[in-house]
Image: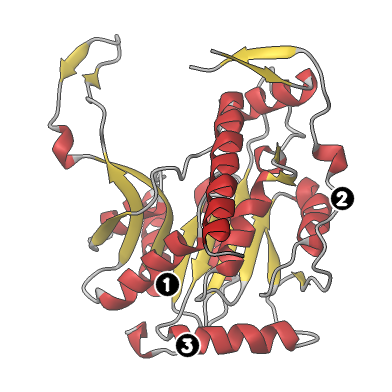
Amino acid sequence: MVFKIQEETRLSSLRAASASSDTSAIIVAAGSSERFNIERRLQESRASEPAAPSALFSPSSPALPDFDHLKIPDCADEITAPGEEASTQGAHQVAASKYSEGDDGEDPSFSKTLAPLSGMPLIAWSVLAADAAPSIAEIILVVRGEDLAEVKRIVAGLPTVVPIVLAQGGKTRQESVRHGLGAVNPLHHFVTILDGARPLVTSDTIEATIRSLRLRKELAGVVAGFPSVDTLKVVDSDDMVCGTPDRDRYWCIQTPQTFRKADLRDAHTLATSIGLEGTDDASLVENAGKSIGCLDLQRDNIKVTLPMDLVIAEALLASRKKNDRAQQSRRGL
């Protein structure tokens, strides 16, 4: 199957970014009372200068910004698709992004999360989803310095309710999350890690992980994912199969990943002290001896890594919009 993709330079940049260790993450923190969170969101949205630990932007215009310079024009290129429980404080989101310096053949100036998707930059979709979740009272985006102006322009035009904080990114995904944690309001006791490269995440999915962690007090975290449907092979360094594990015990893990803030901070501190770089934040909390629960929530919550992933995401968004219109029609809206 062949898909038409436009603008070779943009695709080349995306391929380069995909090949690098370029990652992005979003963190959301919440308190134990959803009703309080909603009231706090309304209060903060009305405040003229809400407190924030770093640069803060409270969008005043509901109109979307002009993203024309990010849209892809027509062209002919092709690719082939193959204790804190007692707290009643509000929620907090951080969108953290880490970008490598760029190896040979990469475009270090290109940010994957700024790639266009259905008329908006990739990262805007997850920001809007987090903003729509009832428990979210603050959004923190951790970005590299060279992206600051563009990210500021993007969020300034988004119709968000909660304030948005910008924090400085680190050299690794893990370091960026740690920077984001440092910007969390001390009154907030839950944090949720989101991936800015997962634009199809829904507010219901985000809220479900927060709600589950509030209820399951024996857990330090709850992560979204789904049981593996593929056969898995253990392969050695020579690409030879050396085992076939029982896939019934394996899950494909996504974000959101929601944690008790104190447990996540302790896990990051321990990981830093022993030089551990985890593939996700749940692995750091596991390493600290804490329990993590899983929720099977959203199979279409894909991660955009390769150019063809944008094609898939576009198709899934179009299908979602079509279903929404059909439901509205049935309700006579």
Task: Classify the position of the C terminus by image quarter.
Answer: bottom right
Disc 3 designates what residue?
A: 35
The CA distance from mark 2 to mark 3 is: 35 Å
Q: Residue at x 32, y 64 (%)?
A: 221
Q: Residue at x 35, y 90 (%)?
A: 86
Residue 105, placed above or below residue 135: above
> In the rendering, at what x and y percent does residue 92 appear?
55, 73
Disc 1 designates what residue?
A: 261
Residue 101, placed above or below residue 275: above
- Left/right placement of residue 105 relative to residue 289 reads right
Q: How many numbered marks have been drawn onto this rendered protein structure?
A: 3
Discs 2, 3 touching: Cβ within 8 Å: no
The nearer-to-camera label among 2 and 1 is: 2
Q: Secondary structure at mark 1?
A: helix
Disc 2 designates what residue?
A: 66
Residue 153 marker? none
Q: Residues within 10 Å of mark 1 (few under 14, many from 20)?
A: many
Between 66 and 17, the residue placed more toward the observer is 66
